Image (spheres, rainbow, N blue to C red):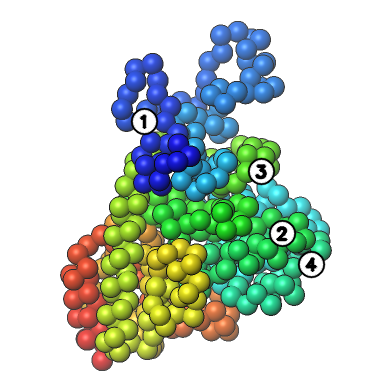
Amino acid sequence: MKTWKKRTKAVHAGIRRSQYNEVSEAIYLTQGFVYDTAEDAEARFIQAGEDEFIYARYGNPTIAMFEDRIAALEGAEAGFATASGMAAVNGALTSMLRAGDHVVSARALFGSCLYILEEVLTRYGVEVTFVDGTDLAAWEQAIRPDTKAVFFESISNPTLEVIDITAVSKLAHAVGATVIVDNVFATPVFSDAIAQGADVVVYSATKHIDGQGRALGGVILGTREFIRGTVEPYMKHTGGSMSPFTAWMMLKGLETIELRVRAQADTAQKLASALEADGALTNVIYPGLASHPQNALTQAQMGAGGTVLSVDAGTQEAAFKLLNKLEIVTISNNLGDAKSIATHPATTTHQRLPDDTKAMLGITPGLVRLSVGLEDPDDLLADLRAAIGQIG
């Protein structure tokens, strides 16, 4: 399997077939497992084997298939599937940190990630320093000999700043810090985060992995030692594990992820290029554009600009008019879906941020995040141009 390409791993990796040799992965809808003897039960609680399970909160055959498949796709040794993307972010950070530890994080983050770092971790005595994620000098200055971890989104939400994984990892590893990367916008298709230096990669499986808006899920990926020794004990005792049925849906999502994400990224590139050329908007932000400040890094790190672009209509009034005039694109707050989705971050996903923080992060009143789906590119472009043309 090590020689397989990602597209093949996404279909075949991690399969565990029962005695019936089914083609499609089986769903094991059970919360517990039976032991032949009391001695077998005792032995399993002391040390469960790779294909031995105790309780669904600890592990399940269907969930294990998903964990093994996404780990193979990412190039990680192991994974732990969680109930949501935020359960994965919280689990990756909280499982390894304790009072007195120091974390350095990029400032540009999804609102819920900011909440965990600003409110939850600091509440329990963890010191957090925020930096401009694109400024390597700021990382170098903030990382201390006692820094325990660094955290960042490889592409920030929603302003689409791209962070140099290799460079930041080198600075962190120089002091023995663990590098945790939220890689949702890069997707497993374009990601080489672990090869580029990340120790832990976190995904919201709700996004591109499911890709069809059906279920919440997440996954933490890393070394076997970190996943089994640090993450698993924390997650199994605090209850943030994925359900077997969700894991089965995510397995089905992985089978088509490369086809979907590459098509979405191609469309996003076409839309961003056309809208920038039109000149009707205040700004068009997309890592695949030559005008993007980290375009060269994007091409080296991912090879494509991803499935999300952001546009600035100038004012909140104009942004709302644009959103309300769209016919194909749906107003919602998810991303990575087969359906194109538009979001106004300042009043939804990042609403809780103070106005000065929004301004510092570039979350302007006119900013609209567009997650590109699987619709025909020409239809989407016509829909966007028509809506833009009506806002004045």
- Name which quarter of the figure residue 322 lies in: bottom left
Classify mark 1: residues with Cα within 10 Å, few (<14), some (14-19) or many (20+): some
- Name which quarter of the figure residue 270 lies in: bottom left
Q: Is residue 259 visible?
A: yes
As measured in the structure, the alpha-carbon distance from the residue carrying label 1 to the one carrying label 2 is 39 Å
Q: Are marks 3 and 1 in contact (CB under 8 Å)?
A: no
Judging by the rendered image, the residue that carries numbered circle 2 is 173
As measured in the structure, the alpha-carbon distance from the residue carrying label 4 to the one carrying label 2 is 11 Å
**Disc with the residue nearer the chain's start (1 vs 2):** 1
Q: Are marks 3 and 2 in contact (CB under 8 Å)?
A: no
As measured in the structure, the alpha-carbon distance from the residue carrying label 1 to the one carrying label 4 is 46 Å
With respect to residue 293, does 182 lie above or below?
Answer: above
As measured in the structure, the alpha-carbon distance from the residue carrying label 4 to the one carrying label 3 is 22 Å
Judging by the rendered image, the residue that carries numbered circle 4 is 144
**Disc with the residue nearer the chain's start (4 vs 2):** 4
Q: Nearer the viewer, residue 321 or 146?
A: 146
Q: Are marks 4 and 3 in contact (CB under 8 Å)?
A: no
Q: Quadrant of the N terminus?
A: top left
User: Regarding mark 1 in the picture, which secondary structure is present there?
Assistant: loop
Across the whole image, how many numbered discs are drawn on residues?
A: 4
Q: Are marks 1 and 4 in contact (CB under 8 Å)?
A: no
Q: Nearer the viewer, residue 136 or 377?
A: 136
